[in-house]
């Protein structure tokens, strides 16, 4: 009997030991050694896969983690999105798809370490770069500075995050080996005290023992580098890797080297072609880094989807990002392997210490859905949530709304002549109506702010419908208010050619929040007979249903619709826009149901055709429906430079890195023209990564108002258009097409007349700087 009790006790102990979660790992350490990282005292090369938990449906988290491991990665790198977790000030949510701690525990369960990047700013082509919209309710706030209110809110959030993640650092037995301080701050400003403040907040949030690092570009990392942080570089495929780490090696010869963002592809924006990057360049770069013992994080390894309203926008100007964050990554948007995956896996196998590579998980099933019609319709006015009357217009933030649309209405004076309506400024897509009749649109993407009005009777009703897209996520323009951000004016020219300037006042404003609950409330009101903004096409909410016998991932095609947001069974799928390039939305199978499924579309411009939808087995990410080409080669925009005097004539030096041209004397003009007459390689393909104009004091002029006026040749394969020379990204570039011939001409509209004393020029970052200009002429006119 005693023996039986002993055996029973042994069995119980064994059962209890087996029941201990695999996340309860032994405490360890991750530190910096001599030219290497040390994991528990042993040299360790970080092979990280960048993935973003809110861009993956939670039921698929573990599958995506296993996919990254099967690629040969040992670590996951992830941003934490402040505005996801604190959507209203003081209200925090770390549940469901926001449970970042659970994502980290799943990583550890699958034998992966984690690098956490908690911002507060993250960029990531995410709404406002991860900063909460409600910060802008304080209109004078200075973002990413030591502004008292900003720092106060950062501290509160980081402490809340610390409650979630600090117990999961490696020192506490968890998977987190490194934590980042801020993000690419050198591209925003130079403020070491601010970066130090963020470092201190991160430490006091429970990350005082874990390794802390900061990332930037090779051209600017010294601006804000702190002595007690690890320094890492960010650069893209094809970059000259030795050049990227050259200065770091000089300043910190014994430091480990790491590329904390090695860009596998690029993001897409509305109205431009789908971005791709060659697999061979990505694989070659990783092969070179691993052969030299350089750690890396592949951004992105799996991009996923910016569901709902979370896709951001880029700057200068306003270039909103599409819903898909496929990123041309090795693991595609819906978690399947790509040719990039298999090429990279083959290379990673060489650096797997002779071990067999983990098996690749099976794909989730993909289904098609037959065409169905969204038969229910109610006008957009049904979605109005709050009404406010005010002398002057208010922004979304002043109306306490983060995302959605707003209707502005006022009465007009009598206008007997044609007049010009100016909206200063419409953020982001405005449609104008008089007495319910459509007059025209003002699109921020196109740099528009005016349209002609017909003559009207006194008391006519002016209505402006504004749809907001994602807030800018990069550069100084992240302080991106939505709605009408200044005022609305009318300029009337009378018979004596005198202009009467009127600022319109006494507005009624109605908010239309972007969320599923508001869409359901609007549909429940029914199709009332009240006044609509426009009858055809119908602007408003559409609902329809489809039935399926089995679930699976699918791609719902919304090309028949105009512009707006989509909800599937209560889940926000994301933004649609007929212009493309994205025409389908990823509908995860885990959000579908056997039997009936509900689809709601809020279309702010109205369908292009009958409101039909269908599900296809592959996404459509590269179909443009533009009114005109995205190139800038209109012959009427090409200047005649024969009679103009160049501001500078000379030759650039060969090789990588920034070069400066100082004019003999200052020049004035609105248009900066760069004429290329030869290249360093001798062929006729010219490329420029970045251009800055310098003011009278030799300082860089803001590029926020810049646009491309003219480019004689642009290679649209890969979106190498003229705007790439001022997009704040050193890894993108303008390039001409083969055989287009010299001279090549790029003309930039500076937005207004400027006094310029010189320029700064950056060739491509790849080894040998392909397309580097040799002989040049620079004009200002």
Image (cartoon, rainbow, N blue to C red):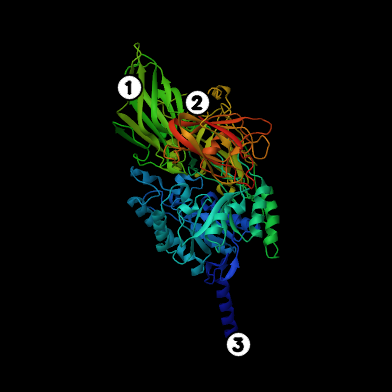
Q: Considering the numbered disc 2 on the image, is that residue within a helix, a strand or a loop?
A: loop
Residue underneath mark 1: 501
Q: Distance between the residues labelled 1 and 2?
A: 33 Å
Q: Residue at x 57, y 50 (%)?
A: 235
| Image mark for residue 3 | 3
Q: In the rendered image, which quarter contains the N terminus?
A: bottom right
Q: Quick one: which residue is furthest to the front in this view?
A: 664
Q: Nearer the viewer, residue 277 or 765?
A: 765
Task: Please tell me which residue is depicted at 38% across the width and 57% down the height of the picture.
Answer: 155
Residue 441: x %, y % from top left: 46, 26
Label 3 close to label 2 by CB (< 8 Å): no
- Find the distance from the CA under tag 1 to the CA under tag 3: 101 Å
Contact check, label 1 and label 3, Cβ < 8 Å: no
Whether residue 672 is visible, yes or no, is yes
Circle 1 packing at 10 Å, graded few (<14), some (14-19), many (20+), is: few
**Which circle marks residue 537 in the picture?**
2
User: Which one is nearer the viewer's eye here, 69 or 592?
Assistant: 69
Q: Which residue lies furthest to the bottom in this view?
A: 2
Residue 412 horizontal/vertical position (percent): 33, 21
User: Which comes before the other along the chain, label 3 or label 2?
Assistant: 3
Category of crowding for the residue at label 3, using alpha-carbon neighbours closer than 10 angstroms: few (below 14), some (14–19), many (at least 20): few
């Amino acid at each position: 009997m005693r023996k039986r009790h002993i055996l029973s006790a042994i069995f119980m102990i064994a059962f209890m030991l087996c029941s201990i979660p695999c996340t309860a790992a032994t405490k360890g350490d991750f530190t910096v050694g001599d030219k290497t990282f040390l994991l528990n005292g042993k040299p360790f090369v970080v092979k990280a896969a960048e993935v973003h938990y809110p861009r993956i449906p939670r039921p698929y988290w573990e599958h995506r983690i296993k996919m990254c491991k099967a690629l040969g990665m040992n670590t996951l790198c992830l941003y934490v999105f402040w505005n996801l977790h604190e959507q209203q000030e003081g209200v925090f949510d770390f549940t469901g798809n926001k449970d970042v701690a659970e994502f980290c525990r799943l990583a550890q369960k699958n034998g992966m370490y984690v690098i956490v990047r908690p911002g507060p700013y993250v960029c990531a082509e995410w709404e406002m770069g991860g900063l909460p919209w409600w910060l802008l309710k304080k209109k004078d706030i200075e973002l990413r500075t030591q502004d008292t209110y900003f720092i106060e809110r950062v501290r509160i959030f980081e402490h809340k995050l610390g409650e979630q993640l600090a117990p999961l650092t490696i020192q506490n037995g968890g998977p987190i080996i490194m934590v980042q301080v801020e993000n690419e701050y050198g591209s925003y400003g130079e403020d070491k005290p601010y970066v130090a403040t963020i470092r201190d907040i991160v430490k006091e949030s429970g990350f005082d023992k874990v390794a802390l690092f900061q990332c930037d570009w090779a051209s600017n990392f010294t601006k804000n580098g702190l002595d007690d942080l690890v320094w890492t570089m960010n650069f893209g495929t094809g970059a000259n890797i030795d050049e990227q780490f050259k200065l770091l090696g000089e300043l910190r010869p014994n430091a480990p080297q790491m590329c904390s963002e090695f860009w596998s592809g690029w993001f897409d924006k509305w109205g431009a072609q789908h971005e791709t990057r060659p697999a061979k360049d990505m694989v070659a770069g990783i092969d070179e880094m691993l052969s030299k013992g350089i750690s890396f994080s592949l951004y992105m390894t799996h991009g996923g989807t910016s569901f709902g309203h979370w896709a951001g926008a880029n700057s200068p100007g306003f270039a909103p990002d599409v819903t898909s964050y496929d990123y041309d990554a090795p693991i595609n948007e819906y978690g399947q392997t790509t040719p990039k995956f298999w090429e990279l896996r083959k290379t990673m196998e060489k650096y797997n210490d002779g071990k067999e590579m983990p098996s690749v998980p099976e794909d989730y099933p993909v289904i098609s859905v037959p065409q169905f019609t969204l038969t229910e319709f109610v006008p957009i006015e049904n979605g109005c949530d709050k009404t406010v009357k005010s002398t002057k217009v208010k922004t979304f933030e002043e109306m306490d709304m983060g995302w959605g649309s707003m209707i502005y209405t006022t009465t007009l004076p009598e206008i007997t002549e044609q007049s010009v309506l100016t909206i200063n400024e419409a953020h982001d897509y405005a449609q104008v109506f008089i007495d319910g009749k459509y007059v025209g649109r003002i699109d921020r993407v196109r740099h528009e702010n005016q349209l002609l009005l017909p003559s009207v009777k006194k008391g006519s009703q002016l209505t402006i419908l504004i749809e907001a897209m994602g807030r800018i996520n990069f550069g100084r323009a992240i302080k991106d208010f939505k709605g009408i951000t200044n005022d609305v004016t009318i300029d009337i020219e009378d018979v004596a050619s005198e202009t009467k300037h009127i600022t319109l006042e006494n507005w009624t404003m109605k908010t239309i929040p972007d969320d599923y609950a508001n869409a359901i409330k609007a549909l429940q009101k029914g199709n009332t007979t009240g006044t609509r903004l426009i009858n055809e096409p119908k602007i408003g909410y559409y609902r329809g249903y489809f039935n399926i016998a089995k679930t699976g991932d699918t791609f719902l095609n919304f090309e028949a619709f105009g512009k707006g947001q989509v909800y599937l069974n209560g889940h926000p799928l994301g933004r649609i826009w007929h212009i493309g390039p994205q025409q389908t939305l990823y509908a995860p199978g885990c959000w579908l149901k056997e039997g009936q499924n509900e689809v709601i579309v809020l279309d702010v411009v109205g369908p292009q055709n009958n409101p039909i939808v269908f599900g296809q087995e592959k996404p459509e990410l590269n179909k443009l429906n533009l009114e005109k080409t995205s190139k800038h080669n209109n012959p009427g925009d090409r200047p005649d430079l024969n009679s103009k005097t160049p501001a500078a004539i000379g030759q650039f030096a060969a090789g990588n890195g920034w070069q400066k041209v100082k004019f003999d004397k200052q020049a004035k003009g609105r248009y900066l023209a760069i004429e290329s007459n030869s290249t360093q390689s001798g062929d006729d393909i010219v490329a420029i990564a970045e251009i800055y104009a310098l003011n009278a004091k030799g300082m860089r002029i803001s590029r926020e108002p810049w646009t491309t006026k003219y480019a004689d040749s642009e290679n649209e394969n890969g979106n190498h258009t003229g705007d790439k020379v001022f997009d704040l990204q050193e890894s993108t570039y303008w390039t001409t097409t083969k055989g287009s011939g010299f001279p090549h001409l790029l003309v930039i509209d500076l937005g207004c007349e400027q006094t310029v004393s010189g320029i700064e020029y950056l060739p491509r970052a790849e080894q040998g700087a392909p397309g580097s200009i040799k002989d040049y002429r620079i004009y200002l006119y």
